[in-house]
């Protein structure tokens, strides 16, 4: 990396990319999430952990523009440097963002892929939405990304349904990363996979996050996944963030009674 | 004064909410500083809080009070109460930690494990690889193992892989948690040589060495931590890991 690039990186990372204030959406008392605030910087990976029903998934929906909050704000600084208030932006602006500068990796790859079209078409879709029409270019991107997520490029014309669960998940990641997003949301990305497949996917994700300098918000109930991928954690319980901080500090020296319970309840293999 | 770290009034308590809210005062009112090229050895019996101190300095334990200031890129940075990304920036460039225990990541090769701190700083892969190979050679890890993930290695081999990783880049400030424990004599000498090289290059070191010969070989000063045993008898193994 040249000095100029480093300087650029430095000024680029000095400002947050994503800023959340007092975000609240409740379905009932302590159901949903409330009072969540944080800033996320370029290249930073934030893990959200907590038990089922603690509000992790609700929070992720609010953050990613899928569900308007009762109150609070979500702001994003786009690649041009302009701040956009997510929920006062138009539906079209929000959709463009989700297709270009953002990505969303669903827990179930069948929710994030188009199952009726080929692997190559799944990868090419975002590029086409951005105006790439040249077949050779789309094909080349398809082959390149299949290789990056360790899928045999010969499978480019196959339908995702002929892929294993682990391959489908990797295809979903490729489909998201092809547009060079700056911010990715992930909902239990290794949740439905065998342990052996999980390790491979995690290693791949770790490499991609660092190479591409991605900011990531990842929801997981698996603390080992959190330790491997996340720079910092928020622990949720009954709709509140009860503790937030550096990942290894939360896992090695949890402060809140609930975090201590969560960490001490994990079986060490 | 050419200090690289200044610690004052540092305290650490553990509140065990799952065990009737027992409060353990492990560290209190610690003051010390370490200069470039100097090695401070923590002294005191098992349970005196030596490892707890190293982990508190590194930031995986949360200080209860006081100040930990380090020289980072030419400026003083306060680590107590710092934002996670500040701590991570300090860990990337300034503050290294070497323990006996390797955290194995499935499927990642030994060479990649060792190179990671250099790649995280943006070093070219070829340069990182050359340095990693030379360290693995010095630490007597057979070349046949370099492309394998260290998960299946013996305890001693994993320990030496972790040491290679710890010395992969030059750290202005290094924390050493018994890096020579349970090594054979030849490998212990290699680790002592690596420590001596880091000192000569101007690193400030803070370490725990149970082995007396190793301790005497590297220590410039001692920090006596053996005062208050009663309060500190248990936490090390409750929180080890």
Image (cartoon, grey):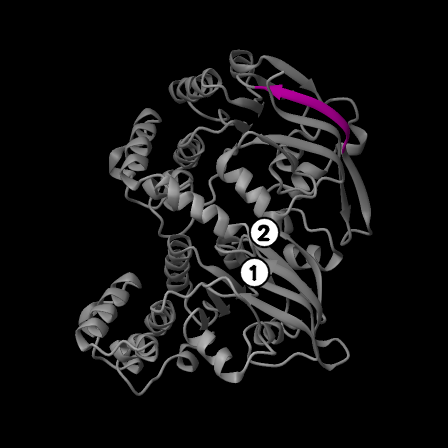
Mark 2 chain: A
Residue B212: quarter of image: top right
Magenta highlight on residue A88: no
At 61% from the left and 63% from the top, the residue drawn is: A19
Q: Position of residue B176 (x, y in %)?
A: 54, 28
Real-space Cα separation, disc 2 to disc 1, in angstroms: 8 Å
Q: Is residue A143 above or below residue A203?
A: below
Quadrant of image for the N terminus of chain B? top right
Magenta stretch: dominant secondary structure: strand
At 53% from the left and 17% from the top, the residue drawn is: B37
Can residue B44 be seen at all in this image of the molecule? no
Mark 1 chain: A
Q: Position of residue B140 (x, y in %)?
A: 32, 27
Residue B234: quarter of image: top right
Q: Position of residue A41 (x, y in %)?
A: 54, 56
Q: Mark 2 points at which residue?
A: A247
Q: Is residue A164 above or below residue B181?
A: below
Q: How many labels does the image show?
A: 2
Q: Mark 1 points at which residue?
A: A47
Q: Do the residues labelled 2 and 1 touch (CB within 8 Å)?
A: yes
How would you rate the neighbour count of disc 2 (Cα within 10 Å): few for under 14, some for 14-19, many for 20 or more?
many
Q: Is residue B179 left or right of residue A113?
A: right
Residue A208 shows which numbered tag? none
Q: Which region is colored magenta?
A: B27-35
Q: Mark 1 falls on what kind of element?
A: strand
At 50% from the left and 56% from the top, the residue drawn is: A42
At 29% from the left and 35% from the top, the residue drawn is: B127
Say which of A1 and B118 sits in front. Answer: A1
């Amino acid at each position: 990396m040249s000095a100029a690039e480093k300087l650029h990186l430095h000024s680029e990372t000095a400002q947050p990319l994503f800023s959340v204030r007092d975000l609240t959406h409740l379905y009932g008392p302590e159901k949903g999430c409330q009072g969540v605030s944080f800033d996320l910087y370029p290249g930073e990976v934030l893990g959200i952990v907590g038990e089922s029903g603690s509000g992790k998934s609700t929070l992720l929906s609010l953050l990613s523009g899928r569900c308007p909050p009762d109150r609070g704000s979500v702001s994003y600084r786009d690649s041009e440097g302009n701040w956009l208030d997510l929920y006062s932006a138009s539906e079209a602006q929000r959709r463009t963002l989700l297709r270009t500068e953002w990505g969303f990796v669903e827990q179930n790859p069948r929710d994030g892929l188009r199952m009726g079209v080929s692997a190559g078409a799944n990868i090419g879709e975002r590029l086409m939405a951005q105006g790439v029409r040249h077949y050779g270019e789309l094909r080349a991107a398809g082959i390149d990304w299949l290789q990056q997520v360790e899928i045999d490029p010969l499978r480019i014309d196959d339908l995702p349904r002929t892929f294993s669960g682990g391959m489908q998940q990797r295809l979903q990641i490729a489909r998201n990363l092809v547009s060079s997003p700056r911010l990715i949301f992930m909902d239990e990305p290794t949740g439905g996979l065998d342990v052996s497949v999980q390790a491979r996917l995690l290693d791949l994700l770790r490499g991609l996050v660092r190479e591409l300098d991605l900011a990531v918000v990842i929801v997981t109930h698996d603390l080992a996944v959190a330790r491997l991928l996340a720079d910092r954690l928020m622990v949720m319980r009954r709709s509140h963030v009860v503790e937030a901080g550096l990942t290894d500090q939360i896992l090695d020296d949890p402060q809140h009674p609930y975090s201590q319970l969560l960490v001490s309840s994990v079986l060490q293999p | 004064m050419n200090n690289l770290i200044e610690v004052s009034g540092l305290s650490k308590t553990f509140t065990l909410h799952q065990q009737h809210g027992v409060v353990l005062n492990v560290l209190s009112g610690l003051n010390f500083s370490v200069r470039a090229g100097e090695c401070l050895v923590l002294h005191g019996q098992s349970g005196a809080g030596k490892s707890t101190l190293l982990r508190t300095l590194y930031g995986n334990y949360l200080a209860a009070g006081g100040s930990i200031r380090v020289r980072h890129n030419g400026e003083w940075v306060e680590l107590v109460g710092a934002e996670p990304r500040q701590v991570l920036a300090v860990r990337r460039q300034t503050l290294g930690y070497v323990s006996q225990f390797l955290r194995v990541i499935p499927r990642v090769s030994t060479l990649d494990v060792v190179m990671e701190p250099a790649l995280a700083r943006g070093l070219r892969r070829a340069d990182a690889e050359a340095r990693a190979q030379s360290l693995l050679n010095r630490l007597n890890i057979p070349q046949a193992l370099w492309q394998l993930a260290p998960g299946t290695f013996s305890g001693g081999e994993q320990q030496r892989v972790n040491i290679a990783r710890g010395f992969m880049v030059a750290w202005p400030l290094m924390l050493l948690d018994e890096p020579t424990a349970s090594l054979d004599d030849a490998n212990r000498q290699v680790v002592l040589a690596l420590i001596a090289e880091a000192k000569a290059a101007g690193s400030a070191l803070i370490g725990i060495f149970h082995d007396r010969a190793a301790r005497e070989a590297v220590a410039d000063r001692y920090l006596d931590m053996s005062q208050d045993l009663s309060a500190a008898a248990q936490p090390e193994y409750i929180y080890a890991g």
